[in-house]
Amino acid sequence: MAKPLSDAWGLVSPSEPRWPATLSIVVIAALNFLLPGKFTLGPPWLIPALEMLIVIPLSIAAPRRRPEEKRWEQFAGMTLIAIANIANVASLFLLVHQLIFNGKDITGKELLYSSVAIWLTNVVVFALWYWEIDRGGPDDRLRADHGQPDFLFPQMVTPGCSHAAWTPSFFDYLYLAF
């Protein structure tokens, strides 16, 4: 096996707080709630309520990611992202369908606000997926035997551009998603 270009490849990540991901889910829920009903899967309150039913107990039970995370915590996190992802794809489909078949019924303001909300949701969903899958996810990154990174950050290959113990956090994945 070739020697990594930087020590950041093999560093064990510190325990990460869950609040950035939780805040992201709250933002996604708010954006979904603000979409007009014709662009949502079910009533506008349904998906945000479902997300809050999962994110609140998860945030209370596991405020930080840790290596010994329980299966239900991992499953709940992945389910939250999947729900947000599916709801956003459905909203995009409904928006495009409405444009194609009932374009005269959509105002420019409604189109602009809805498309920006769908795009922002997409960026945040990708950040959550990136954070969840890179090197096995936040809980696996805490282990010394974690896998190689799926994403290459400049800090990993440019010696001296960051402190020696740098590892990516949720905000780095959010930046990557843009």
Image (tube, rainbow, N blue to C red):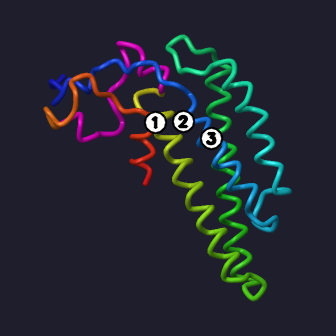
Residue kind at label 1, given as amino acid type: Phe
Mark 3 or 2: in front is 2
Nearer-the-camera pick, 23 or 99: 23
What label sits on residue 107 in the rendered view?
none
User: Circle 3 sits on which residue?
Assistant: 81
Nearer-the-camera pick, 137 or 49: 49
| Residue 28 in the image: above or below residue 161 | below
Residue kind at label 2, given as amino acid type: Pro
For label 3, count other residues whose C-alpha is less than 10 Å away and answer few (under 14), some (14-19) or many (20+). Answer: many
Please report the bounds of the magenta region as a residue range.
138-157
Q: CA distance from mark 3 to mark 2?
A: 13 Å
Nearer-the-camera pick, 92 or 175: 175
Label 1: state its secondary structure: helix
Q: CA distance from mark 1 to mark 2?
A: 7 Å
* N-terminal-most mark, 3 or 2: 2
Residue kind at label 3, given as amino acid type: Ile
* x and y, in percent, of residue 70 in the image: 63, 15
| Residue 65 in the image: above or below residue 132 | above
Q: Would residue 37 be found to the left or right of residue 87 on screen?
A: right
Which quadrant of the structure image shows residue 165?
A: top left
